[in-house]
Amino acid sequence: MAELLSVQGLRSGYGRIPILMGIDFTLAPGEFLGILGHNGMGKTTLIRSLMGYLPATAGRITLDGRDITGAKPAQKAAAGIGYVPQGRQIFPDLSVFENLRMGQAGKSREDKAVIDQVLSLFPRLTRLLDRRGGALSGGEQQLLALARCLCTQPRIILLDEPTEGIQPNILDEIVETLQDLRRQSGIAMILVEQNLEFLTALSDRLLIIQKGVITDEVSPEMMADPERIADFVGMHA
Ligand SMILES: Nc1ncnc2c1ncn2[C@@H]1O[C@H](COP(=O)(O)OP(=O)(O)OP(=O)(O)O)[C@@H](O)[C@H]1O
């Protein structure tokens, strides 16, 4: 399979504290890759390193075969890498619609058609366009952060712990929205999570991260059997 993103021997950390100890994986076009790990295993560090917020101390990241290891976050965004941070970071004083427009802030002119197309995936947000971002529930904010990222028209989305602090009813809606996105678009996604059930519902392939190293890969065949995965990774949902 052709590869869109390739990560080889990636190391990074904070100051002199190493956290990522040599991460290797590839992402194919349109693939949803899940990365499962407990608290503190390096998931956010990995996403922030891929996005360029933390410099790699070793290793190589390529996009379409082009080396982007040292590229700045804005350059990575311009190359088509979208980022939905943990904690969502929506603008609390702006309306839902204004938050979506911020997703187009880097473009020379606003493209309302793109916002409309994105909104077709998010009926709940369409009903809340005038509401302040800060007045949304956690789950609604997560939907907004995802929709805002889609307004940048990325080829890859990096999604950091989307289930954190979200009520179960809206979590199901987030899963369905992502499943629709997976079916309808050619977007590829890296989802880092500690929620096994969420990842098995969405991932084509699942990697396990422990202490800054990818320790295992769960094959697509095994993905069909959540009990077996839970035993395999020692993480019952
Ligand atoms: N700014 C920082 N300075 C120093 N160490 C940090 C910093 N941020 C995170 N760490 C450490 O890096 C390690 C990995 O943290 P990271 O946030 O990547 O984990 P995670 O898997 O995303 O966990 P969580 O689910 O808690 O977000 C942890 O040991 C954490 O304490």
Image (spheres, rainbow, N blue to C red):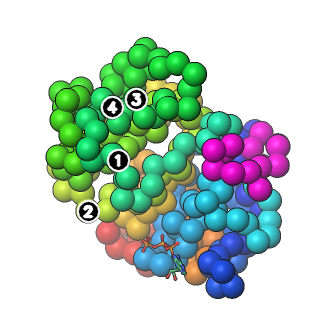
**x and y, in percent, of residue 36 in the image:** 49, 66
In terms of secondary structure, where does tag 3 sit?
Answer: helix
The residues bearing labels 3 and 1 have C-alpha atoms spaced at a distance of 12 Å
Closer to the camera: disc 3 or disc 2? 3
For image coordinates 56% across by 32% down, the residue present is 106
The residues colored magenta run: 62-76
Look at label 3 and name its amino acid: Arg
The residues bearing labels 1 and 4 have C-alpha atoms spaced at a distance of 10 Å
Which residue occupies the foreground of this view, 198 or 227? Answer: 198
Per the image, the residue denoted by label 4 is 98
**x and y, in percent, of residue 184 in the image:** 46, 26
Look at label 4 and name its amino acid: Glu
In terms of secondary structure, where does tag 4 sit?
Answer: helix
The residues bearing labels 1 and 2 have C-alpha atoms spaced at a distance of 15 Å
Per the image, the residue denoted by label 2 is 165
Mark 4 in CB contact with mark 3 (< 8 angstroms) = yes
**x and y, in percent, of residue 13 in the image:** 64, 76
Sequence-earlier tag: 1 or 2: 1
Closer to the camera: disc 1 or disc 2? 1
For image coordinates 74% across by 51% down, the residue present is 71
Per the image, the residue denoted by label 1 is 90
Which residue occupies the foreground of this view, 231 or 60? Answer: 60
